[in-house]
Image (cartoon, rainbow, N blue to C red):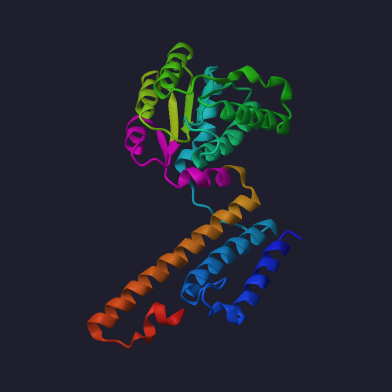
């Protein structure tokens, strides 16, 4: 039943393709966009295949990401020093994809702090992020069998204002001097302000964002950095959830196929124009 909806959708699409309306003006599917449809089906097929493989117990290889492999080190260091671990999920609201990725990682970090009985501080810039973060951390503590150590007050709201939030977080960092700081989400100009403060107090810092303009500041001030899509792959890497691992692997294979297709199309067009090879090798003719 898990893939019945997908199979039904594919059958409906194939039936649509087999009808004459494909050639009619204003039809459901336009003939000159068949190549896009084929690439989409390959992409979706890869994802579905690897999800089923992961759920059936197949091994899904995911390369080692140093920033995520160091999470245990960071939490362990905070435990040994008797200090807190601070997690900052960015400054954007819950509808931002980077915020959701950060909250997914927060769940894994909270499970580790629950096992090690380490204080976890989560300052939030948005009220909806606050509520979600409280639920994520509470569920993580329940799953590990340590609901009594969960402290709702450690996940708290600071302010919506960008630089006021940075000032509030910096003040907390200077006063409490946590041993580990994780900044995973959407960050802008406040990134260097917070990261430099964390560097000044000697905390081990793990940062990650998809904002390319802020990555240089994180690289300069932090110990480990998740770059670009590594932030979105982190939840699959840390949770080992078959659904997430299969989706991650399927997307990577689909991207490789698309890259190969683009390169082939470029080479085919170059060969056609320079060496006058018949246009039958062009992708536009193959998919037409």
Seen as rendered, the residue at the extreme front is 25
Seen as rendered, the residue at the extreme left is 274
Pick the residue in front: 204 or 175: 175
Residue at 48%, 34% (x, y): give it. 184
Percent position (x, y) of residue 202? 40, 21
Percent position (x, y) of residue 287? 46, 79
Number of callouts: 0
**109 horizontally vs 189: left or right:** right
Percent position (x, y) of residue 104? 58, 38
**Based on the displayed image, in which of its 4 quarters is residue 226 positioned?**
top left
**Based on the displayed image, in which of its 4 quarters is residue 189 positioned?**
top left
Residue at 46%, 46% (x, y): give it. 230
Range of magenta residues: 208-237
Percent position (x, y) of residue 63? 49, 51
Pick the residue in front: 23 or 172: 23
The quarter of the picture where the N terminus appears is: bottom right
Q: Is residue 282 magenta?
A: no
As drawn, 240 above or below 114: below
Residue at 41%, 38% (x, y): give it. 225
């Amino acid at each position: 039943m898990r893939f019945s909806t997908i199979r039904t959708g594919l059958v409906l699409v194939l039936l649509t393709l087999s009808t004459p309306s494909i050639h009619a003006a204003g039809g459901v599917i336009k003939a000159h966009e068949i190549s896009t449809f084929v690439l989409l089906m390959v992409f979706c097929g890869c994802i579905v295949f690897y999800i089923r493989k992961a759920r059936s117990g197949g091994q899904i290889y995911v390369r080692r990401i140093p920033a995520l492999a160091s999470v245990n080190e960071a939490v362990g260091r905070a435990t040994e020093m008797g200090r807190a671990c601070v997690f900052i999920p960015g400054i954007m609201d819950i509808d931002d994809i980077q915020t959701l990725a950060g909250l997914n990682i927060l769940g894994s970090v909270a499970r580790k702090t629950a096992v090690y009985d380490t204080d976890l501080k989560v300052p939030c810039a948005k009220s909806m992020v606050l509520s979600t973060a409280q639920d994520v951390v509470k569920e993580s503590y329940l799953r590990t069998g340590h609901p009594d150590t969960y402290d709702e007050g450690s996940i708290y709201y600071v302010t919506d204002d960008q630089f006021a939030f940075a000032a509030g977080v910096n003040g907390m960092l200077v006063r409490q001097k946590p041993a580990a700081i994780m900044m995973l989400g959407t960050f802008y100009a406040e990134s260097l302000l917070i990261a430099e403060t964390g560097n000044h107090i000697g905390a081990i810092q793990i940062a990650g964002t998809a904002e390319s303009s802020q990555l240089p500041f994180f690289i300069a001030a932090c110990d480990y950095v998740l770059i670009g899509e590594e932030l979105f792959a982190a939840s699959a890497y840390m949770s080992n959830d078959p659904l997430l691992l299969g989706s991650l692997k399927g997307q990577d294979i689909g991207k490789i196929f698309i890259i190969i297709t683009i390169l082939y199309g470029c080479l085919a067009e170059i060969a056609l124009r320079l060496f006058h090879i018949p246009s039958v090798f062009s992708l536009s003719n193959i998919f037409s």
